Each structure stands twice: as structure tokens, then as C-alpha cells.
Amino acid sequence: MGTLETIRSRPLLLLVAGAKGAIGSTLALAGCMMQRQPELISPYLTTADLWGDATDAQPVHMAGWDRNPMAMTEALASHRVVPETLWAGDREPLNAIPVAAAPNNGLSVSAQIDQLLRDIDGFRQISPDAQPVMVNLLPACMECALPHGDNGDNMTGGRFPDLAYARAAIRAGIPVVNFTPNDLGDGDLLATAAKKGIPLVGRDGKTGQTYFKVVLASAFKARHLRVDGWYSLNILGNADGRNLMDPDCARGKLANKTNLLDEILGYPVGEAYGEGAHKVHIDYYPPRGDAKEAWDVIDIKGLFGLPMSIRVNLQGRDSILAAPMALDLARWVVLLQAAGRGGAVPELGFYFKKPEGETPAATWEDQLRDLKALAAYCRQQLAS
Ligand SMILES: NC(=O)c1ccc[n+]([C@@H]2O[C@H](COP(=O)([O-])OP(=O)(O)OC[C@H]3O[C@@H](n4cnc5c(N)ncnc54)[C@H](O)[C@@H]3O)[C@@H](O)[C@H]2O)c1
């Protein structure tokens, strides 16, 4: 099993589906910088606080898959997430990251899995002592759920690219972080992962507006301030934003962003009006690139039912918020696997808009409490 310290001293091997996307390429740079300038990475990891080692520099290796044939540095330049001055010194290691071609959409899911398993074998040989984690950063897609009773083996993988990656990982004994809103939709896979002791965590990283929404909604709930309505608008100009203009692709994401408010508060927002008054919109707006902007108009009621209103304007950076969370989650699942936890891990609800697993905590303080309890569990299981 190993102690916490021995596990933390071994390198991570991130196997990233969508390695050259906005988050994937930012993660690649963060991994390289972990060696050179850990002070630019470690302090921004939630796990640094939890494990009490804010200056640690656990080595991070990366490999993965993408459809995009361009070099990693070209991908970094094209996403305009990180200024070139920050990555110019890392051109060589960035472009040396092995990124295999994604399996052809026309192949059956099982043929895709075979190809991915061969790739995984090859990646593992490059970093034999590293601890591999599959990180799903594929684009948001239409419902990924398989029709009931269909194991997908004979269907082509075009509509369900995520499924082949997740299944290949579980078959290879590798934990999975599903950062996308895509529902792997496969209860069997979760059950297999649980049986084999392999964590499969997700879904939909809670990076910006929704994270602050959870914090604020939890605060309103604690003070018994009644939320009367909540209007949220996002503009973003990256590929994720363009993709989310397709209503079929956006449906899952919007549902994840919307449902959690009522779950936190314990009542449907808008009940006074007989209809929902929590509105969430996402608009693709090219000038913004990855520098997403979000507005929230929050109407609340206090004593005597008198109204008050709050404005929140977040000028964020999508992938700068997301990449450290993906790294955090990779560190978590490696420890959890070593500590004997497999399948869904609802205690990681802090990181996700739609946490997998039974009865994940809804409020921010409960999610933080769960996270700390999970850290204590790992520490106890992995005590020397
Ligand atoms: N940035 C955030 O704050 C945030 C928050 C929550 C969830 N997410 C989700 O994370 C995911 C990644 O976001 P992003 O901004 O990096 O997206 P992106 O579009 O920039 O990157 C996706 C990458 O996947 C590649 N790809 C497409 N099909 C593939 C396949 N079959 N196999 C391998 N690679 C393939 C694309 O070429 C691209 O490089 C999205 O699903 C997004 O909705 C992002």
C-alpha cells in the first residue's frame, strides 16, 4: 500500500483525454513548472493545505490523446490562456509530452478501448514508477448515457468518446477524474470500479461562477436570508464556449449549474412565482477567449419579507481556475486508491457541480467538512 509520504514522493502520470485543449495544455505547463518553479503551482492547490505541505513539488509527468495534431506549444499559443513569457522556457519538455492520436470515431467502443490500452502500456513504460491517472478533458458532448441495457461494445464510439477512455482506464486499474459535464452514464462501470477498488470521480469541475454560487447560497442559507431569484450570465470565448452554443451540448452543463442551488437551499427558487427564478445563461463571445466573465444578480428577502439585491461580477480565467483542480483531483484519486477507496467518491463534491455517488453534501461548509474528513481517512489508512 505505501505510506502517505511514499505515495506523495512518487511522480504522477496524468493520462489526459483532450491533452491539447485549453485546460489540458495549461495542465501540461503546470506539470512542467512543478519541477522548475513549484512556488508558482503548489500554493494554488487545495491539496497543499490538506496535506500540510504547501511547498511540495510532487513530480508530474503527462501523456495523453488529442485530435489536434499541433505541437503542445502551438496549442498553448492558440488558446491564449498563459502568456508566452511563462512557457517559453519549457518548450522542450512541453513538446516532448507524448500525445497519441485519438481513436477513430468510426471504431466500435471495444476497438477504441483496445487501442487506448496499447497506448496506456506504452505511456507507462516511459514513466514506469509513476502513478497513472486518467483525466477526462474532452469537450462537453451530447448525452453520453447509453441506452438502458446496452453495454456499448458494438456501437461506434463517435457519440461516446468519453466512455472508451473511462473503460480503458478501469480495465487497466487506473483511477479516473471526469472533469467534463459528460455523464459516463454507465452504472456498471462505477460498480466495477468500486469492486476493483479504483476511484472514478466526477463530474463537471466547479471552477468559477458555480463555486462562488455554492459559497454564497450556503451563506444565505446559514443566515436564513430567503433567495427570491438568481440570474447568472456567463460570456466566454474559448472552444468550450463555442461548443456550448450547441443546445444539445449545453443541456447537461446548464442542468448541473442550475440544480444545485435548490439542493443547497432546500426549496425551489421562484416558488413565490409558481415558476423557476434561477436562470443560467452561457454565451459564446469571441473577444473574451479563456478570460471568462460572469455576472450574478441575486435577489434576497430579509425580515418582514423586505427585498435586497446583490451583484457579483467575476472576471475569471477558465483554465487557470480549472487546471489546478484537475491536478488536485489526480493527487486525490491516487491516495484514495492506495487507501482502498474505489468507485464514486461523493466526499469530493467540493470539486464538482454534479458529484457522483450517493447523497453528496450540498452546502459549501458540508463539502469542506467532507473533504477534510476524507483527508483524515487517507492519513489514517496510509499511516506508516
Ligand atoms: N474550464 C472550466 O472552467 C471548466 C469547468 C467545468 C468543466 N469543464 C469542461 O472541461 C472540458 C475541457 O475544457 P477545455 O476548455 O479544455 O475544452 P477544449 O475544447 O479547449 O479542449 C478539448 C480538447 O479535446 C480534444 N478532443 C476532441 N475529441 C477528442 C477525442 N475523441 N479524443 C481525444 N481528444 C479529443 C480537442 O481537440 C481539444 O483539444 C470540457 O468538457 C469543459 O466543459 C471546464
Image (spheres, grey):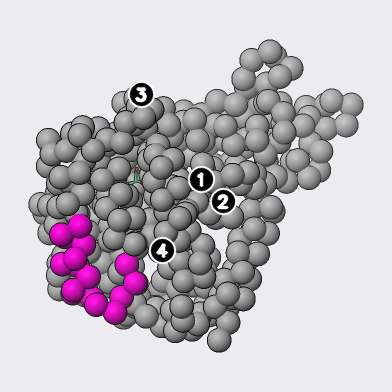
Q: Which of marks 3 and 4 is nearer the N terminus?
A: 3
Label 1 CB less than 8 angstroms from ligand 1: no
Q: Residues within 10 Å of mark 2 (few under 14, many from 20)?
A: many
Q: What residue type is labelled 4?
A: Ala
Measure the C-alpha gap from mark 1 to mark 3: 23 Å
Q: Where is residue 175 in the image (x, y as percent from the top left)?
A: 38, 60
Q: What residue type is labelled 1?
A: Glu
Residue under circle 4? 330
Q: Position of residue 35 (x, y in %)?
A: 32, 80
Range covered by the magenta-colored residues: 117-132
Q: Is residue 371 magenta?
A: no
Q: Which of marks 1 and 2 is nearer the N terminus?
A: 2
- Between disc 4 and disc 2, the foreground one is 2
Q: Where is residue 114 in the image (x, y as percent from the top left)?
A: 17, 51
205 relative to 148, above or below? below
In the picture, the disc for residue 147 is none
Residue under circle 2? 346
Q: Does the magenta stretch include residue 125?
A: yes
Q: Residues within 10 Å of mark 1 (few under 14, many from 20)?
A: many
Q: Which residue is drawn at 55% across and 25% down?
A: 279
38 relative to 340, above or below? below
Residue under circle 1? 356
Number of labelled discs? 4
Q: Which residue is drawn at 36% across and 29% down?
A: 149
Quadrant where the C terminus is found in the figure: bottom right
Q: Earlier in the sequence, mark 4 or mark 2?
A: 4
Q: Earlier in the sequence, mark 3 or mark 2?
A: 3
Measure the C-alpha gap from mark 3 to mark 4: 30 Å
